[in-house]
Image (cartoon, helix red, strand yellow):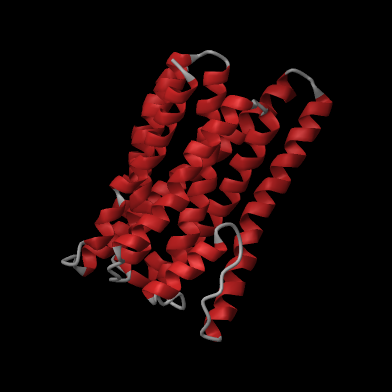
Amino acid sequence: MSTAHILLLGAIAGATIFLGLPAARMQSLGANARSGLSALATGILVFLLWDVLSNAVDPIDASLHAHRWGRFAELSTLGAVGFTGGMMSLVYYDAWMKRRADRRTTTLVGPGAAAVDEFVERQRLDLTNPAVRLAFLIAIGIGVHNFGEGLAIGQAAAASEIGLAVTLIIGFGLHNATEGFGICGPLSGAGIVPSWRLLGLLGVIGGVPTFLGTVVGQAWASDAVSVVFFTVAGGSILYVVRELFAVNRKYGHPVLVNWVLLAGILLGFATDFVVTAAGV
């Protein structure tokens, strides 16, 4: 299979995130349905936290079992720095956004800041709304996670393991389809009906990194790069999960929320089985 075909399939795997986003446009959702979508988003992200940290720890464990102490020290340090950076960067980022919101401004910082700011101004979105900010944070965290998935696809292709690469693309494509629910959960839970352009922007933030990771992974294989991106994703997802738990408590419906939270976790594992089978 040619490089172009692998990159095309990697792009398709990232694009499936758009399949779950239209759920946020459903205007007839009742209070129970909104609470359920928020809980489903939380469950999916809890699974993703386990998933990314497992992928990050695998090469660290391998170096430890091989008694490669220098390599172990290097990878574990990168992992700790990545995890801390992923979480605390969103802590400070969200605090900064809240301060800006208090002054009724919409200026953003970080990758894609200009595009986001221009888009928000045109759509007159209220970024003082915690649900809107949380949706952006979720998309960013998922995007970092999907870059790591793209690295796995690209590195399998670079090693001429085409069957594995294709299976990973299928598995991650199924997986990413559920992540759209994770992004739109806070919006649906707050009763916000986003524009198609906003959903498109959130999908690009969360989905395009799968393609970019495929490009990088096919050109350059590195355990260190994988550990950094997976741990950064883990830290950012942990912060978002903490925020979503607070949102779920505010919505109430504890029995419903816990059942749907469990369903979200199981759904994450179910879509991951295809990827796991590729390694058998």
Q: With respect to residue 234, does 166 lie above or below?
A: above
* Quadrant in which residue 25 is drawn: bottom left
| For residue 175, above or below residue 171 | below
Image quarter where the C terminus lies is: top left
Q: Is residue 159 left or right of residue 67?
A: left
Q: Is residue 276 visible?
A: no
Kindly identify the residue that appears in the image at 51 percent across and 54 percent down: 140
> Which of the two residues, 229 or 63, is positioned nearer the viewer here?
229
Q: Residue 262, how many percent across, how many down?
A: 34, 47
Quadrant of the rendering where the N terminus is positioned: top left
Q: Is residue 88 above or below residue 212?
A: below
Q: For the point 42% across and 36% down, which residue is it?
A: 11
Q: Is residue 223 left or right of residue 208?
A: right
Residue 33 visible? The answer is yes
**Number of on-image labels:** 0
- Farthest left residue in view: 28
Q: Residue at coordinates 57% horizontally, 15% vertically from top-left?
A: 159
Q: Is residue 238 left or right of residue 40?
A: right
Residue at the image point whose x is 62% and y is 41% from the top = 229
Q: Identify the image quadrant of residue 274.
A: top left
Question: Residue placed farthest to the bottom in the image?
Answer: 103
Q: Position of residue 28 (x, y in %)?
A: 15, 66
- Relative to 261, say whether 24 is above or below: below
Q: Nearer the viewer, residue 197 or 184?
A: 197
Q: Give how far across and how far down residue 222 sits, in percent.
A: 67, 28
Residue situated in front as seen by the camera: 77 or 154: 154
Q: Outermost residue toward the right?
A: 70
| Residue 84, percent from left and from top | 68, 52
